[in-house]
Image (cartoon, helix red, strand yellow):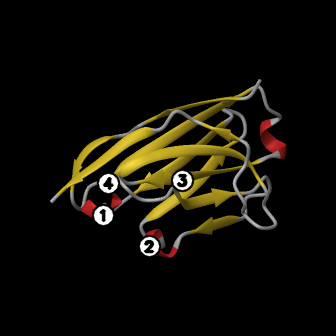
Amino acid sequence: QVQLVESGGGLVQAGGSLRLSCVVSGSTFSFNSGGWYRQAGGKQRELVAAISSDGRTNYAEFVKGRFTISRDNTKKTVYLQMNNLEPEDTAVYYCNWGLRSSTWASGAYWGQGTQVTVSS
């Protein structure tokens, strides 16, 4: 059974940084793609960034140049480094596992979500 455990959310001032982590268990980590989505109040969940098994990345336009997704196959962990955060980045961030790297369609497995709040 695949399980995703997220951590690293919190409250930060605009311009600050946070790093989210997602530890994956129950999956052949190195063969699969992972990503981060976010959902703000009253809005649909949207893709933030994704990374394939061979390290290709995909970013939403609104985070390009500010966020970086990475993975550590030895630690079975996907990271999202978020710099220069803006109040508009406030949302619940979800780890997603098993994405289809050809289309970046979401995978079947989701974490519980971690709250990121950016104050102005």
Residue 69 drawn above or below residue 60: above
Residue 8 drawn above or below residue 13: above
What's under tag 3, amino acid-wise?
A: Tyr
For the residues labelled 2 and 4, say whether their Cβ atoms are less than 8 Å apart.
no
Q: Earlier in the sequence, mark 1 or mark 2?
A: 2
User: Which type of secondary structure does the marked residue at label 4 adopt?
Assistant: loop
Crowding near the residue tagged with mark 2, few <14, some 14–19, many ≥20 C-alpha atoms within 10 Å: few
For the residues labelled 4 and 3, say whether their Cβ atoms are less than 8 Å apart.
no
Mark pair 3, 2: CA separation: 13 Å
For the residues labelled 4 and 1, say whether their Cβ atoms are less than 8 Å apart.
yes
What's under tag 1, amino acid-wise?
A: Glu
- The residue carrying mark 3 is 37
In the rendered structure, find residue 88 and report the number of the disc placed on it.
1
Crowding near the residue tagged with mark 4, few <14, some 14–19, many ≥20 C-alpha atoms within 10 Å: many
Mark pair 1, 2: CA separation: 10 Å
Q: Residue furthest left?
A: 120
For the residues labelled 3 and 2, say whether their Cβ atoms are less than 8 Å apart.
no
Mark pair 4, 1: CA separation: 5 Å
- The residue carrying mark 4 is 90
For the residues labelled 1 and 2, say whether their Cβ atoms are less than 8 Å apart.
yes
- The residue carrying mark 2 is 62
Residue 2 drawn above or below residue 88: above
Q: Position of residue 102 (x, y in %)?
A: 82, 66
